[in-house]
Structure formats: C-alpha cells, structure tokens
Image (tube, helix red, strand yellow):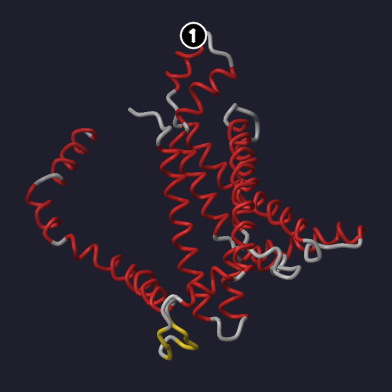
Amino acid sequence: MKKAKKNRDRAALNSPLIRRPIQKCFWLFLLPTFAAFCIGFLYPFCKGFFLSFCDFKTTKNWTWVGIKNYIAAFQDKSFGHAFWYTALFAVVSLVLINVIAFAIAYALTRGIKGSNLFRTVFFMPNLIGGIVLGYIWSMIFNGILIKYSTSVVLESKYGFWGLIILMCWQQIGYMMIIYVAGIQNIPGELIEAAKIDGANSWQLLRYVTLPMLMPTITICTFLTLTNGFKLFDQNFALTGGNPAKMSQLLALNIYDTMYGTTGWQGVGQAKAVIFFILVAVIALIQNKLTTSKEVQD
C-alpha cells in the first residue's frame, strides 16, 4: 500500500498540470538567489575591477589612471615574494592535508572500534575560527621557540611551518569526512570481485580504491588548493606578515597594501584583481587535470 501511494504521489508531481505552472514561473524562484548574487558578488566585483584602474580614497572619489596601478603592483617586490611564498604554502599544504586525510579516512573505514568518535574528534578543529586558531597556535609555537630565543614572527621559516601545521590541523578533519563518504560510496561488489581475482590490499588500493575516488580527490584538492591561496585570517593572527612582510601570503599582502599604505588603495585593488584571476586559472587547471583521470561510467 505504501509503495503504491508513493508511486501515485510521484506520478502526480510529474503531471503536466503541476509541472507547467512551475516551469512558467521558475524565474520567481530564481530571482531571490540571483538578486543576492548580483548584490553580494557581481556588483562589488565589477566596481572593484573598475576601481583597479583608478586612484581613489573612497569609492565615490576617484581619478582614472589607467594601468598605472597594475604596473605598480607588478613592480612591488613584496607582492612577488608573497606570490611565491603562497604558491609554496599551497602546494605543501595540499599534499600534506590530502595524504593525511585520506590515510585517516582509509583507516576509519576498515571497521575499527570507535571510528565514529574519531571522525568527530578529527572534524572538530574545523569548527574553530581562523583568528582564534591563529592566536592559540601562536602561543603554542612561541612557548616552544622561546627556549631557542626566537619566535614565529622573528624568522619566516618558522612562520611558514607554523601556518602549515595550523592549516593541516584545521583542514584534515574536514577533508577526511569527504574521503570517508567517497570510500563508502565504492561498490562492494567491485572490491569483492577484485579479491576473488587475487588482488592484495595494495593492489585494491591502487587499482580499485584510488581510481574510484578520483571525483572525491578532485573536490578535496580543489578545496585545499583554493583555501591555501586565499588564506588570510590565520596568517594575520599567527605572524601578521612578520618579519618585515616575509611571511605574508597574497591575501594579507593585498590587505596590507589596501589599508596599511597611504595612497595605494588603487594598487591594492589591482592586486586583488590579479589575485582573483590567478586563483581562478590555477583552480581551473587543477580541476581539468584531476577530472581527466576520473573513471568514466
């Protein structure tokens, strides 16, 4: 009876009498989301892109200067250093986070006791804000490094690895949950067939699990890479860009240019546009490379 009722309800929803009014008025459902997108993203982005070609102190008080701001941005040595510092940070964090998250997810899906508790514990750091994490880890690192008469703000290498540890601690649990969902979605029949054919654990991992996980790997690497490039609050709280802007990531460098350097608001806006294009291009390339390795149905 329940199955028959469910089938009737499904047929009723697919009825032309119901679908046609919805199809005609779909824009009414789309309008609130589209309006929010235009107000919250499209208009500010277009305004910012225009201001990147201007010298301004407020958004209504501007003077057109052409590509002068972009030339100044590319000539700024701190911006170039921040780019390579961010690129190295993004690559190292991408590898460490995804390898460790996958290893933990793989272990937790082997049927060990307390796996649900471990998932919760590993995920909890992701619930803490970046600023709070930055200050907490700053105290931890400085408490250790003070014994060696240094700190995370005195040497950029300590700031770099401090950011790596902080990022891993915060993001591994989140990526682990995604990997767990991906592993559990692998058909059991496929694994059983591989075992019958004589595949050992390593062969199962290499030839079955990893290929079937490529859509999940695409998502996780995309999130990790973009998060690494646009990291701001943890960088701001942990090192503040010290010493002498040597530990600035791109987002913090743009913020410092915009609000910390008088008369460089236009240059800061130009850097933001360059930053947007850079992250978009890298994300698209990464997505293309990983999706090309996905198993096709």
- For this rendering, which residue is in front, 67 or 29? 67
In the drawing, does residue 252 fall left or right of residue 181? right
Task: Find residue 134 and report its horizontal and vertical position in percent.
Answer: 69, 63
Residue at image position (91%, 62%) is 149
Task: Find residue 1 and report its horizontal and vertical position in percent.
Answer: 21, 33
Name the amino acid type tagged 1. Ile
In the drawing, does residue 68 fall left or right of residue 94? left
- For this rendering, which residue is in front, 181 or 217? 217
Report helix, strand or loop for mark 1. helix
Task: Find residue 229 and report its horizontal and vertical position in percent.
Answer: 55, 57
Residue at image position (51%, 54%) is 226
In the drawing, does residue 152 fall left or right of residue 118? right
- The answer to whether 262 is drawn above or below residue 9 in the figure is below
- The answer to whether 50 is drawn above or below residue 218 in the figure is below
Task: Find residue 63 and report its horizontal and vertical position in percent.
Answer: 42, 88
Q: Which residue is mark 1?
A: 196
